[in-house]
Image (cartoon, rainbow, N blue to C red):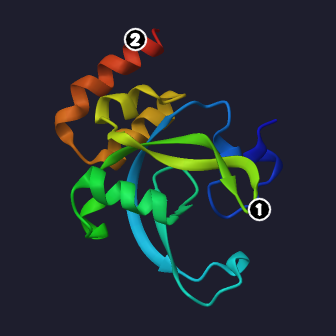
Amino acid sequence: MKYTDRHPDKKYLSSFDLIGEENIQALITGFRMEVIERSGSDTPKPVLELFGLKPIVLNLTNDKMLVRLLRTNDSNKWIGKVIIVGVDPVKAFGEETFGLRIRRRLGTPEGYLRESASKEELKSRYRALNDSSLLELTKQIAQEKWKK
């Protein structure tokens, strides 16, 4: 049983949700500022919403990476972009642990679609991308992965 399944009450994506997954491609669907209860602060933190995943609370490292990668500091312009999220060993609070990291390269709609684990997920991802030019590619991927 995966970490995410053992801890369904966790509200935000954690590095432990992705350990063993290598890098995943994720579609940005929204951005908001939110007071994070566990932070002990009343200061709102940036939260990145991802299609089909828990949201990510952006630390400074990942926020800066998104600005560089997407070439804009306007988070409203990030929506609809495919990014790659991975896990790296990090030193935090004096100890070695794991941290979520936005990778230095963009994901692709094709790669995002190819990572689908089921036909239903493929259909959902295609609809979320909201790009009708990807229809033929989506059909091709379905035939390759789930031949009848």
* x, y percent for residue 68: 28, 55
Q: Which residue carries the number 1 mark?
A: 9
Depth check: give the residue in front, 101 or 24: 101
Residue positioned most to the bottom: 42
Relative to 104, say whether 67 is above or below: below
* x, y percent for residue 64: 38, 61
Which of the two discs, 2 and 1, sits closer to the camera?
1
Q: Is residue 68 visible?
A: yes
Depth check: give the residue in front, 29 or 98: 98
Residue type at mark 1: give it: Asp
> Which secondary structure lies at badge 1?
loop
Relative to 25, say whether 54 is above or below: below
Pick whichever of labels 2 and 1 is earlier in the sequence.
Answer: 1
Residue type at mark 2: give it: Glu
Q: Residue at x 38, y 14 (%)?
A: 143
Residue positioned most to the front: 94
Residue 103 found in image quarter: top left
Q: Residue at x 24, y 64 (%)?
A: 77
Q: Which residue carries the number 2 mark?
A: 144
Q: Residue at x 68, y 77 (%)?
A: 39
* x, y percent for residue 56: 54, 60
* x, y percent for residue 111: 36, 29
Q: Tell me how far mark 2 sits from mark 1, CA to CA.
A: 35 Å
Q: Quadrant of the N terminus?
A: top right
Q: Which numbered circle lies on residue 109? A: none
Q: Is residue 25 left or right of residue 136?
A: right
